[in-house]
Image (cartoon, rainbow, N blue to C red):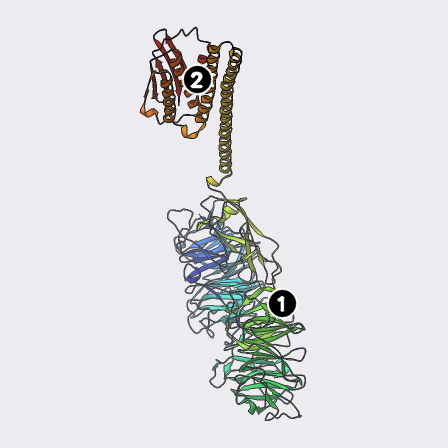
Amino acid sequence: MCVCSLVCLSQDERQYTFAHYSTDKGLAGHEVKAVIQDKAGYIWVGTVTGLQRFDGTRFVTFRHRKSDPGSIPENNINHLFRDKKDNLWLLTAAGHVGTFDTRRFRFNPVNIAYTKKNSVQADKKFFTDSRGNIYLLCFRTELLVYDEKVKQFVPASHLIPLPPKWPVLSFCEDAQAGKFYIGTDSGLVVFNTRTNNLSYSGHNVEKELLVEQYGHIPNVAPMLLDSKHRFWFLSWPPTVGCPVFYCYDLQNNSTVLKNYSFLPLIKEYHEPSAMIEQKNGTIWIKGGNIFASYLEKENKFQLVHNGYINGQSISFETVHDLREDREENLWVATNNNGLFRFNPGHEFFQNVHHMNRTKNIPGEGSALCFLTDNNNTTLMGAWGNGIYRYDSSFKNIPLNIKGIPENNNIVVWCMQQSNDADIVWMGTQPGGLYKYNRQTKSAAYFDVPALEQSTVRQIAEDKYGNLWIGTHTRGLFKYTRTETEYNFTTNVEKITEVDARTINALTIDKSGNLLVGTSANGAYVVDTRNNRVIHHFTTDGPPQQRLQTMVVTSFCIYNDTAVMIGGGGFNVYNPVKQTIRKIITPSSMPFDVSAIQKDKDGYLWVTLTTGMFRLKPENLRVFMVFDRIDGIANDRFVTGSSATLPDGRMVFGSTNQFIVFNPGDFVMVDSLPDVAIAGFKVQNQSLPVDSLLSLKRIELGPNQNAITIELSYLLFQRNSLLKYKLEGIDKGWVHADITNQAVYPYLPPGTYTFKALTEDAEGRPAKNITTLIIKVRPVWWQTWWFFGLIVFVCLGVFLWIDRLRLQKIKATESVRNRIATSLTEDMGNSLSSINITSELAKTKIDTDTERTREYINQISDSSNRMVQAMYDMVWSINPESDTLRHTIDRMKDYAAEMESMYTPSIIFQVDEQAKDLRLRMETRYEMLSIFKEAVNNAARHAQAKYIEVNLQYKNPALTLCIRDDGKGFNVELVELSRGLSEMRRRAGNVDAKFTLKSEINTGTTVRLSMNQ
């Protein structure tokens, strides 16, 4: 909400509150030549160092780049113009003309078909008419019009003819009458488009009254036709020392201004260059060393004060351009001090600066207190400068109080109306009281000895007529009234239960109790009947009865259950429940409250040491803040200095002035604007917003996950808040800071919805939400197909491991089966042999002793063989026997037994590299069994004297060869024998190749080959 100030200047000058944009805020340069607002609401600024777009928070700069044909042709922008199709036209200092695409940021040049050579260097301006024609005025040379068909500017003589040799200086259209008013160096020309007639001095064919009276005036420029059908123009003939203004009422055919000069106001060189009319009808004129508005009632111009007063004043040499935006803000482009913005129609804060009547200079003392007096006047006490009286417009008028001099310097800290409305009590420095009678308009001073000259800061009168006096250094006193007349030499007692030196605030609540605010010891509630302290609130005690700090500066009785307590924080006191609730103020605001007032709509207005805010107790989250930017010339407010006037206006005092305003003027807009996406940065690199917004969703790569979204509601008055959230990242709505940026330094892969909206000062949201869908693509190892591949591989590995497990189980089961089968066969054969032999032995035991002995020997051999088989099986299962070295040792043990039983010579030849081979359990077992069978046959049956056991290893084959020199046998005859069949079976169990060769009386060779 733009708010402007009014300070005490001369009647011919007025000080407004300006927002100033300079290079420290992003402006490209101090010289601004043009400014305009586009359809979307952005402000476009033409400077000598580039073209800029402003969204209320940040400037985006566009400059000429040699490598980019779509950039602006040069950086020095002279003029900006928006046509009826919302195209933005640029005119540069070197004469380049074209349109600038405000969405894609591309410049489109337009050719100019000059007919005169000096037109190239002439000053130029754009104009338009009611039919949408775009004119290019070449000052003092020719008038051109844009031809859409050929895409260039051509002479406009076919539309607007001119008298020969009358160079054009300015022109404007009267669409209602169908006429053009053309200013030339030789006079004023009127062209009637309906009759195609030209009227000018010496050739007034249509008897134009304007031409009759003012057609002879030369050098007519600039000109303006306002909404009241008044024709304004300026003339500055070469022989005249200064320009003069004219205003002619075309509707009433009467002169409004004639030969009006600014010389009485501007006593130095000035050069008006243009006039504009605001939407509210105000006429403004601007130019070199001139900036003024027309006062309708006074029929004269009033200057805008040019010169530094404070940070919200304006200082310029030349106003190059002046434009109004859709909020009725005026944008002022200056040649030396950047860009300014103000809203003259919204003067909500009136700044009143009192005068030091002794020195006749602006007073420097703080405005300490206020009181409404008779005839809607207001009394004000200023520290060191005395008591002042102001009328309803807050113009200083005579004090007119008997007993107080007009040019007084009495220091009055407080003014309190008595229960008898005719009496006003004033507390002074040093400690004393003035009793002011409104009826007699007289005042009497009373000394109060008990105060010992301590300043009276606060006065309160209870319902019994007693006065309570708060001092600066002596604490709290009570004057008990016992007589009709006042006598302060007696009946004044110090309230010792209130332990404080400085009393900042005194208020009688609705129960008749006295509220006391101290500077260092919290707040007291005192029973006015017996002077007893009912409550003492500090930072200690129960949580529901604590203050935020010990400093209390002000009270405001809101209703029966709410008393606002200001000081080092803001609290709500409930006198019914005797509880205190803390109000949390935003961290960006100062913590110290100076004064509090309640308006008729229930809003609380709270001043601070820097600025003020508005708050409604029903919504303690929303603070509407005002400070110097909003038109408060001095926002350093004074403790307890405030008042509400009978008409609802409020007054707050600061360190050298005071402000007056009507709270009802701060009306919120009916509809809130939508949030605009003003910029989008990825990895701090800007992307074209227009292209992004045309997409259904914005897709970013895995390395593009740091984004900044620049937001704007394209309003330049502070009347709404902006908040946003990124669903999936932000838990709730986030209120934007002063930068209006949403910054996300890291976004995990995923799809997000960004939302932004505005809300008013009451926290009510806008109807529409601006939405962006943003997708951040994952890196390849975060994609769904990669996760699917991982799952597939893991599943495959699991299945492979499970298959190996099953294979191992099957192998183990197979080994178990083979072991069980082998043991079953060996044991079954042996037991069967033992059984048969034992039966035979039983039948022969009594008749054939030799045969019985032989049977017993067979039984012994079978049992030994069974034991050996079981022992071999246990040995093969033992993991410690896995290497071939252990198998060879086992073979040698067996060979030693054979040598002891049958005396053959058994020799082993083993490759050293084969000894460390690790063999499977079944391989060891089957190989050992084949070895035993072959050695047993050679030693026992073949009666061999020499047996050679050879183990050879050539990767991957391991070969066992057993040769003997026994008597041999016919292989074919014993092919089906049990021993040979058993060896072949065992070789097949381990996928080994078994061969046997034998010759009678030569020997036998058994060979076993297997792969490792």
How many numbered tags mark residues here? 2
Image quadrant in which you'd find residue 1008: top left
Q: Horizontal and vertical percent for residue 852?
A: 48, 12
Does 23 sit left or right of 636 as displayed? Answer: left
Does 13 sit left or right of 952 as displayed? Answer: right
* Residue at the image position 43 percent from the left and 19 percent from the top: 929
Q: Horizontal and vertical percent for residue 559?
A: 66, 72
Q: Quadrant of the N terminus?
A: bottom right
Q: Horizontal and vertical percent for residue 781?
A: 46, 40
- Labelled pair 2, 1 in contact (Cβ < 8 Å): no
Disc on res. 617: 1
* Residue at the image position 44 percent from the left and 9 percent from the top: 975
Q: Which residue is mark 2?
A: 987
Q: Is residue 484 above or below residue 47?
A: below
Of the residues shown, which amino acid type is indicated by label 2?
Ala
Q: Nearer the viewer, mark 2 or mark 1?
A: 2
